[in-house]
Image (tube, rainbow, N blue to C red):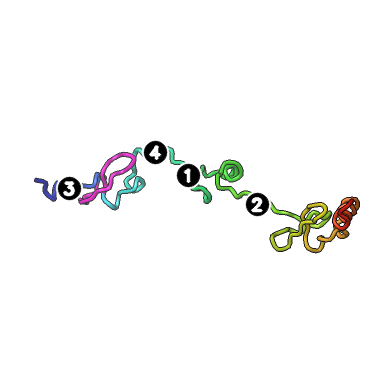
């Protein structure tokens, strides 16, 4: 039968007399320490100097660990990050010089040239629709025998 005293361990730091029921094990040297000396820096861990600790940064988009170097972070965000923002294609009025962004409300498709225009350029004369197309469609529209 196990006694309570079997689970209590003494802190392995030289000069510390603390006894702990749940000692902390150092991840570098594997020795058991009390709460005051649980960090590697607190008990001057000999194995800590041998291990090269590198700082890393987490990508805010995909939570991937990256080296803490600005050029590496920039390279990841531009080329490698799977969650980089994708450009959404936008429709713009086909009238030369007009930069109006078209949406469901302000889009008009010309019946003659079948191009998208904003409301101010929806008429054939305002967006310079090809004349022969307008005449042909006018004749076909009103004089079905041509």
Q: CA distance from mark 3 to mark 2?
A: 62 Å
Residue 35 is one of the magenta-drawn residues: no
Tell me the chief SS of the magenta region.
loop
Q: Nearer the viewer, residue 38 or 137?
A: 137
Q: CA distance from mark 4 to mark 2?
A: 50 Å
Please report whichever mark, 2 or 1, sits nearer to the chain's N-terminal start: 1
Instruction: Name the residue tied to disc 4.
Output: 49
Instruction: Name the residue tied to disc 3.
Output: 7
User: Are the residues at dot 4 and dot 3 in contact (C-beta closer than 8 Å)?
Assistant: no
Whether residue 101 appears in this view of the structure is yes
Q: Say which element carries label 4.
A: loop
Q: Position of residue 77 (x, y in %)?
A: 58, 45
User: Are the residues at dot 2 and dot 1 in contact (C-beta closer than 8 Å)?
Assistant: no
Q: Residues within 10 Å of mark 4 (few under 14, many from 20)?
A: few
Q: Say which element carries label 1.
A: loop
Instruction: Name the residue tied to disc 1.
Output: 55
């Amino acid at each position: 039968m196990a006694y309570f005293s079997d689970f209590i361990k003494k802190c392995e730091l030289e000069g510390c007399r603390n006894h702990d029921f749940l000692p902390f094990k150092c991840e570098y040297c594997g020795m058991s320490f009390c709460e005051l000396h649980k960090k590697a820096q607190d008990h001057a861990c000999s194995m800590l100097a041998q291990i090269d600790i590198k700082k890393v940064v987490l990508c805010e988009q995909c939570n991937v660990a990256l080296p803490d170097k600005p050029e590496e972070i920039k390279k990841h965000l531009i080329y490698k990050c799977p969650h980089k923002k994708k450009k959404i294609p936008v429709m713009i009025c086909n009238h030369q010089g007009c930069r109006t962004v078209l949406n469901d409300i302000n889009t008009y498709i010309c019946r003659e040239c079948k191009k998208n225009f904003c409301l101010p350029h929806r008429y054939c004369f305002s967006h310079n629709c090809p004349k022969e197309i307008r005449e042909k469609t006018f004749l076909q529209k009103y004089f079905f025998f041509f």
